[in-house]
Image: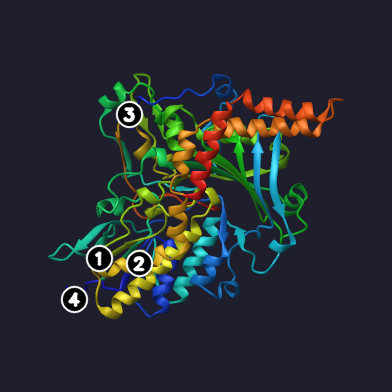
Amino acid sequence: MANKLTFDAIVVGGGPAGTSAAITMAKAGLQTILIERGRFAGAKNFFGGVLYTHALNEVLPDWQSRGPALERPVTDTGYWLLSPDSVLRFTQKSERYKKVPAESYTALRANFDPWFAQQAVDLGVLVITKTTVTGFLRDEKGRVIGVTTDRPDGDVYAPIVIIGEGVNNLLTQQLGLAKSDLPPRYVALSVKEYLGLPEKEVEARFGLSGPDEGVAIDIFGDVTLGLPGTGFIYTDKAGISIGCGLLLEQLVINNLKPYEILARFKNHPIIKPYLEGAERLEYGAHLIPETGYDRMPALYTDGVMIAGDAAGMVDALHREGTNLAMIAGKMAGETAIEAHKQKNFSAEFLKGYRRRLQDSFVLKDLKQYRRMTDFLDSTPHFMETYVNFANDAAYRYFTAHGMAKRDMEKEIIRLLTRRRSFLGVAVDMIKLLRGMRG
Amino acid sequence: MSEKKRTTLNPALAATLPPTNVDDLLVSVKYYVDEEYAHIRIKDDRVCAECAHHPCLDFCPAGVFTQDRTGKILVGYQACLECGSCRIGCPYQNVDWNLPRGGYGVAYKFG
């Protein structure tokens, strides 16, 4: 027992949630160990994607001076509605986005996450990689007092364990905090390619004036064959991240190959010119928990707190996840600091973690959009019908036919009613509103 | 999930999907293959034999699941991107999916 490896806190997983928790606790002087199964923090992490600086500000206020591994600030952002032969763009480009630091940046996780974990190391966290946590150590009353790993003599003890294990929340399930595996209806499978393209080319194609501008676009409609899901294009420093995500259940029941959907998307006449000559540098896939507020795991038990994707902390509508994870990780860390002060690691005390989240945007947003995935799933025609209608209507609107405008307006209405009855439209809009308002 | 629920995608749309060889994509992925431990296995081959649509052959983004001439499902775990889809997407929960041992499996270069 003399060699028992003991810390003040154990963090499982070196992603945004785990690293934020570790940084928060290390700054308060807690002896913290972070255990990561990949060869480095971020080796298993994969996203679109965009990072939000409001979360970094809270976790690591001096992050800017620490040389963060970011790609481009997002200065031009919005939605594209893609029909088989057209696109209708709702994007905003503004000088207002051009501030330092910007509100959000595109990033590549195999660069960002190791940088973030290094900040934790610099603050005194012991980061152990290539080690998979396999289970829990418990005291005689069944309370968690540490973890087991796949290393020889790899047991690690601490009165508090923060789990940021990611979407495949096997440990959370092992603890009984998640009652079952994620239902395929509430999980998106996303695939992405990172394409290399010279900086100047990226800027010319997307109308960017230099490296301090960047694009983040979500794309609806034909990209997912009209099925519930989205596509995305983000500009990186010298490359483009392009991908798409569909609810896993849709892929299952339609026998679809996600990479064929992506290949089709890349080949779309509107999309193709942006990618011409770009070289595929990496392909990957990741699940996104869209389980929502009503299906979240319990967030704590004796000696344990759960943060990030493992707890389903994703706001898919606004493509937010890493920021929810960072804030949750920080709040778990703060709760752990309090627990140490009070020498109380009981579930009753750790309830404070959930309270903090409830007072923040994390649980407020998740609660507001609790019906969003259900809305998409119960209205599978939504994307196809309205995206195609919007494109047809725009085409009709922007072309002249020597016809009275009043007649043209009627024709546009007919374009819609041919696709969906007035009652159907009304029901869809009410459902959408419910999904948005919570 | 039961297999009862099946929506059929508009066949004209489905026909626009370009046949794609997943291996062409996977050459861009860095792996540290664990030759001694397969982190994915089929729980019971008989369940796969009874499965009507074999969605795993399609939805797996790495094409880990293939079928041999006898119809048996083979698992090429070495190509796994560790997304976890098969664990939850198999209609019969017939895929035993675990985390690879520490340090093994996919290691994204860009992520």
The CA span between labels 2 and 1 is 10 Å
Please, what is the three-letter code of the amino acid marked with disc 4?
Ala
Chain to which mark 2 belongs: A
In the displayed structure image, the side of residue A135 where residue A199 appears, left or right: right
Q: Quadrant of residue B11?
A: top right
Q: Is residue A211 left or right of residue A22?
A: right
Residue nearest the viewer, comparing A358 with A408: A408
| Position of the N terminus of chain A by quadrant | bottom left
Q: Chain of mark 3?
A: B
Residue A254 lies, in percent from the top left, at 46, 27
Residue type at mark 1 is Ala
Q: Same chain, marks 1 and 3?
A: no
Q: Determine if residue B106 is in view.
A: yes
Q: Chain of mark 1?
A: A
Question: Element at badge 3?
Answer: loop
Q: Of the numbered discs in the image, which one, if any, rests on residue B2?
A: 3
Q: Position of residue A117 (x, y in %)?
A: 47, 66
| Disc 3 with disc 2 on a shared chain | no
Q: Is residue A108 above or below residue A416?
A: below
Task: Give the residue at mark 2.
Answer: A353
Q: CA distance from mark 2 to mark 4?
A: 33 Å
- Distance from the alpha carbon under mark 4 to that under mark 3: 52 Å
Mark 2 or mark 1: whose residue is earlier in sequence: 1
Please give the residue where the numbered disc 4 appears in the rendered image: A2
Q: Nearer the viewer, mark 1 or mark 4?
A: 1
Q: Which residue is mark 1?
A: A347
